[in-house]
Image: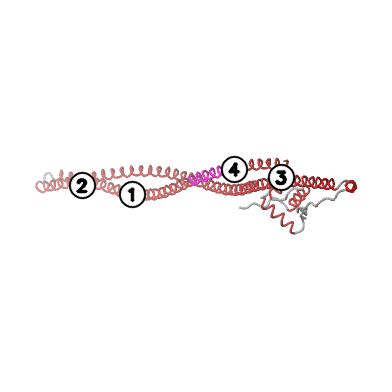
């Protein structure tokens, strides 16, 4: 993402006017040194646009064409004296004058050539310095833009990290709630298992009572069968012996009473057995219902365990993503530090070149 222009047209106008007053060349580097910000190429483009629009007037350069040195006429005083002298002296004086002018002209041309050579060397060094400064300023602007991009990317990654942390907190909260729910359901399941154990115990007791009642019924049936056999024997004895009739009748009445008592006891035992069977059926229904509830609870626990595993995996993925983002951020910070180090080296080189340029200008 490119940064906005860091300078205004007014700053460019003021810098250009200041350079004109100082008699210095106007280029991207000199404008950058005056304003203190901006790319040299961008500053020069703005200067040319302002110059084309008439807001900055370009200075007129003096005519640098060389003028030929003409032969100098003698002053009137020398001419008057020469008129007196002999022609040889006049010729000698002309020769001396011409030789003097020639010597001065040669020395002046040599001095001009040396000055031009120094100016050319200074201009060359200045151009190299300007080129190095332009390169350094371009690197500085590139580094600033890269820094802005890195800062924007860091902001985006911080936002992503915050979002992942929020999602992680939500997942941890849901996981904690799920664990609390699982703990509550485990407690309920343990309580239900206790109830089932208690009901199973009651069922075992009822089955034991049923077995005892069945044993008592079998014993009473056996006693009833034995009593019937005894009654048959007694009736046989009654028919065979009339003498023992009264005794037999008494025995028959006693046996009948015993038989009625045994029948009543048998009826009570049958009623108790039916009640036990009803209770056993009710307990078996409760046990089946509790077994179904346990199966449903187990399925729900399996679902919660699956959801917990998924949330744990998402938590691990989020932590891995955060570690990757932190690693990328560290790499980008290292790259930024390297860029800033390169920028510092470029600034040192620019300062060195500026010092050399100032030294050449002083020469």
Give the number of the disc on residue 221. Answer: 2
Residue 159 in picture, x, y percent from top left: 57, 48
Residue 125 in picture, x, y percent from top left: 66, 45
Q: Nearer the viewer, residue 297 or 6?
A: 6
On whether residue 299 falls in the magenta region, the answer is no
Q: Nearer the viewer, residue 240 or 221?
A: 221
- The residue range painted magenta reads 318-336
Name the front one of labels 4 and 3. Answer: 3
Q: Secondary structure at mark 3?
A: helix
For disc 3, the neighbor class at 10 Å (few under 14, some 14 to 19, many from 20) is few
For disc 1, the neighbor class at 10 Å (few under 14, some 14 to 19, many from 20) is some
Marks 4 and 3, how far apart at CA = 39 Å
Give the number of the disc on residue 342. Answer: 4
| Left or right position of 120 against 319 | right
| Residues tagged 2 and 4 counted as in contact (Cβ below 8 A) | no
Residue 175 in picture, x, y percent from top left: 48, 45
Q: Earlier in the sequence, mark 1 or mark 3?
A: 3
On whether residue 330 falls in the magenta region, the answer is yes
Give the number of the disc on residue 114. Answer: 3
Marks 1 and 3, how far apart at CA = 124 Å
Q: Name the residue at the bottom extreme.
A: 53
Magenta segment main secondary structure: helix
Name the front one of labels 4 and 1. Answer: 4
| Residues tagged 1 and 3 counted as in contact (Cβ below 8 A) | no
Q: Earlier in the sequence, mark 2 or mark 1?
A: 2
For disc 4, the neighbor class at 10 Å (few under 14, some 14 to 19, many from 20) is some
Q: Earlier in the sequence, mark 4 or mark 1?
A: 1
Q: Which residue is mark 1?
A: 284
Give the number of the disc on residue 87. Answer: none
Marks 2 and 1, how far apart at CA = 29 Å
Q: Earlier in the sequence, mark 2 or mark 4?
A: 2
């Amino acid at each position: 993402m490119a940064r906005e222009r860091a300078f205004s047209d007014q700053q460019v106008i003021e810098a250009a006017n200041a350079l004109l007053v100082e008699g210095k060349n106007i280029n991207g580097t000199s404008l950058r040194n005056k304003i203190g910000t901006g790319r040299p190429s961008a500053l020069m483009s703005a200067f040319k646009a302002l110059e084309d629009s008439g807001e900055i007037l370009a200075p007129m350069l003096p005519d640098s064409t060389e003028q030929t040195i003409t032969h100098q006429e003698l002053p009137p005083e020398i001419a008057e004296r020469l008129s007196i002298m002999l022609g040889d002296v006049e010729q000698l004086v002309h020769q001396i004058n011409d030789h003097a002018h020639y010597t001065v002209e040669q020395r002046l041309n040599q001095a001009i050539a040396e000055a031009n050579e120094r100016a050319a060397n200074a201009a060359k060094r200045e151009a190299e310095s300007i080129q190095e400064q332009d390169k350094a300023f371009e690197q500085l602007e590139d580094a600033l833009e890269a820094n802005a991009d890195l800062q924007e990317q860091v902001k985006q990654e911080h936002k992503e990290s915050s979002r992942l942390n929020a999602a992680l907190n939500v997942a941890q909260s849901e996981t904690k709630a799920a664990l609390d729910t699982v703990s509550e359901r485990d407690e309920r399941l343990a309580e239900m298992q206790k109830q089932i154990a208690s009901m199973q115990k009651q069922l075992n007791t009822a089955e034991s009572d049923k077995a005892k009642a069945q044993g008592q019924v079998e014993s009473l049936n056996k006693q009833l069968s034995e009593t019937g056999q005894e009654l048959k024997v007694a009736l046989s004895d009654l028919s065979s012996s009339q003498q023992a009739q009264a005794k037999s009748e008494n025995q028959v009445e006693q046996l009948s009473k015993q038989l009625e008592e045994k029948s009543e006891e048998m009826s009570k035992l049958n009623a108790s057995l039916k009640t036990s069977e009803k209770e056993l059926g009710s307990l078996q229904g409760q046990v089946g219902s509790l077994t179904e509830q346990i199966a449903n609870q187990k399925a729900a626990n399996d679902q919660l365990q699956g959801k917990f595993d998924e949330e744990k995996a998402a938590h691990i993925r989020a932590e891995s993503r955060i570690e990757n983002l932190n690693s990328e951020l560290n790499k980008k910070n290292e790259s930024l530090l390297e860029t800033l180090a390169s920028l510092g080296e470029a600034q040192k080189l620019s300062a060195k070149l500026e010092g050399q340029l100032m030294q050449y200008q002083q020469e």
